[in-house]
Amino acid sequence: MRPFLTAIAAAALASGAWAQCVSFGGFYGCGNSTPFEIPTVMCAGSPTVGNAAFSVTTGVPCVSPAPILVIGPCPPAPVLIPGPFGNGGFCGPSMAPCMAAVGPTIFGVVVGAILTPPNIWSFALPIPNDPTLQGANVCIQEANLCPLFPSGQCIAVSPGISVTLL
């Protein structure tokens, strides 16, 4: 029986099914319009225990002073957050809804560093070399301020990703 279970685990690892960064809940996120002004978020590197170089990158369609990543548990499903423009958000009417992909508690908030001005940001998330972290899962979502014309600012939010450590 043990060789059979080992073969299943090896197949899952070889396919990348266990240690992943995957979309959490499908396409959503909000900004000024769909899909062009909605932030993106993705892993840069493998979420492997001991990977000190692991990071997350985001594409922020507007000029933002300091985007943030919100990190926490994955809810059963993303939660709708209606804004002043309805389900489409806080920056103006959008076909994609604003959804929270982290919560209800938050483990941490990380401020980004500019990677490629003005729109690509990097968030260093070094993973300690601690075997007890294997299999841990978190959800990550990016939020940023965007200029709202003719004056003011609004909140843009990326879709979420689910990260499972190997």
Image (cartoon, rainbow, N blue to C red):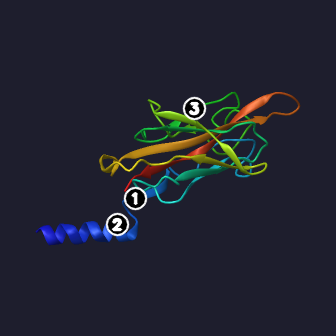
Q: CA distance from mark 2 to mark 3?
A: 36 Å
Q: Quadrant of residue 84?
A: top right
Residue at 77% of width from left, 44% of height from top? 62
Could you tell whether 85 is left or right of 102 in the image?
Answer: right
Residue at 52% of width from left, 43% of height from top? 140
The kind of secondary structure element at disc 3 is loop
Looking at the picture, which amino acid does disc 1 mark? Ala
Rendered location of residue 45, percent (x, y): 52, 59
Looking at the picture, which amino acid does disc 3 mark? Ile
Which mark is first along the chain, 3 or 1? Answer: 1
Residue at 57% of width from left, 54% of height from top? 42
Could you tell whether 19 is left or right of 59 in the image?
Answer: left
Looking at the picture, which amino acid does disc 2 mark? Leu
Residue at 74% of width from left, 45% of height from top? 33
Rendered location of residue 116, percent (x, y): 74, 53
Mark 2 crowdedness (10 Å alpha carbons): few <14, some 14-19, many ≥20: some
Quarter of the image with the C terminus in it: bottom left
- Residues at circles 1 and 2 in contact by the CB criterion of under 8 Å: yes
Q: Quadrant of residue 68?
A: top right
Q: Is residue 2 above or below residue 68?
A: below
**Residue beneath disc 2:** 13
Rendered location of residue 31, percent (x, y): 71, 41
**Residue beneath disc 1:** 19
Q: CA distance from mark 1 to mark 2?
A: 7 Å
**Residue beneath disc 3:** 81
Quarter of the image with the N terminus in it: bottom left
The kind of secondary structure element at disc 2 is helix
Which mark is first along the chain, 3 or 2? Answer: 2
